[in-house]
Image: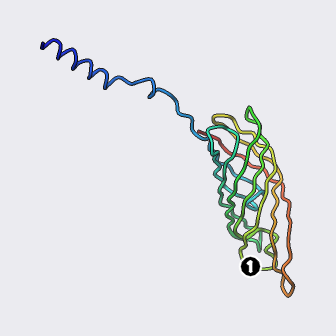
C-alpha cells in the first residue's frame, strides 16, 4: 500500500511541475513602432508611438506623438493623435491615416498666437520589418481646419506637407 501511495504522490508531483505544451506556445503580440517624423502630421519634428490593433504587422492601428517647433516666431508643442491602416506584405506597406493635431501648426499661426485643433490625413509608404528592425516612412500629410485672420472672418485652410520618418519596430 505504501508503494502505491508513493507512486501516486510522485506522479502528481511530476505532473504539477512539468510544463505542458500549452505553456510553450509563443503568443503573438501586436507590433509597436517608435519613430521621429520630420514635417508630417505633427509639424516640424515629432516623436511618435505607433501600435497595431491586431497581431499582424499590417491592418488597423493608432499613433500618438509629441512635436516641437522653433522657427523664429513659430514656437510651441504639437500633439498629433490618429488612426491608421497599413496594407501590404513582407515589410512594405501603403499607409493611410487620419486624426487630429493640437497645438501651434507652423505657418498657420502667424495670424494669431492661439493653439488650435486641426484635422490631418496621411498617405504614404512604410517599410517596417515583420518582427523588429529599422522602419522608414515617407508620404504626404495634409492639415485641414479653419484659421482666424485679424479683422476678417474665419477662413478654411488646407496645407499639404511632405514628411519622412525613421524609427524602430518591435514586438
Q: How dense is the environment of label 1, judged by Cα within 10 Å: few (below 14), some, or many (20 and up)?
A: few
Q: Eyeballing the image, is 130 above or below 116?
A: above
Residue 70's image quarter?
bottom right
Residue at x 67% of width, y 34% of height: 130
Looking at the rendered structure, the number of numbered marks drawn on it comes to 1
Residue 19's image quarter?
top left
Q: Could you say where residue 92 lies in the image, as x and y percent from the top left?
A: 77, 36
Q: Eyeballing the image, is 92 above or below 103?
A: above
Q: What is the image's colouring?
A: rainbow
Task: Answer with left or right where residue 22 lies relative to residue 46.
Answer: left
Query: Looking at the image, which residue sits at the far left?
Result: 2
Q: Eyeballing the image, is 63 above or below 72?
A: above
Residue at the disc numbered 1: 113
**Which of 76/56 is in front?**
56
Q: Eyeballing the image, is 96 above or below 146?
A: above
Q: Could you say where residue 39 lies in the image, as x and y percent from the top left?
A: 78, 57
Residue 91's image quarter?
top right
| SS at mark 1 in the image | loop
Quarter of the picture holding the C terminus: top right
Query: Looking at the image, which residue sits at the far bottom?
Result: 151
Task: Answer with left or right where residue 80 lies relative to residue 14.
Answer: right
Q: Could you say where residue 3 lies in the image, as x and y percent from the top left?
A: 15, 11
Residue at x 81% of width, y 56% of height: 141
Amino acid at each position: 500500500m505504501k508503494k502505491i501511495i508513493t507512486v501516486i504522490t510522485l506522479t502528481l508531483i511530476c505532473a504539477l511541475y512539468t510544463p505542458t505544451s500549452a505553456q510553450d506556445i509563443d503568443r503573438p503580440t501586436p507590433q509597436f513602432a517608435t519613430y521621429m517624423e520630420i514635417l508630417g502630421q505633427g509639424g516640424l519634428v515629432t516623436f511618435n508611438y505607433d501600435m497595431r490593433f491586431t497581431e499582424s504587422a499590417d491592418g488597423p492601428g493608432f499613433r500618438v506623438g509629441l512635436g516641437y517647433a522653433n522657427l523664429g516666431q513659430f514656437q510651441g508643442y504639437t500633439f498629433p493623435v490618429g488612426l491608421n491602416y497599413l496594407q501590404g506584405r513582407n515589410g512594405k506597406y501603403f499607409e493611410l491615416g487620419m486624426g487630429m493635431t493640437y497645438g501651434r501648426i507652423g505657418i498657420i499661426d502667424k495670424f494669431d498666437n492661439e493653439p488650435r485643433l486641426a484635422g490631418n490625413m496621411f498617405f504614404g509608404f512604410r517599410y517596417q520589418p515583420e518582427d523588429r528592425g529599422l522602419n522608414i516612412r515617407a508620404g504626404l500629410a495634409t492639415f485641414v481646419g479653419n484659421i482666424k485672420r485679424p479683422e476678417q472672418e474665419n477662413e478654411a485652410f488646407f496645407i499639404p506637407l511632405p514628411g519622412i520618418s525613421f524609427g524602430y519596430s518591435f514586438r
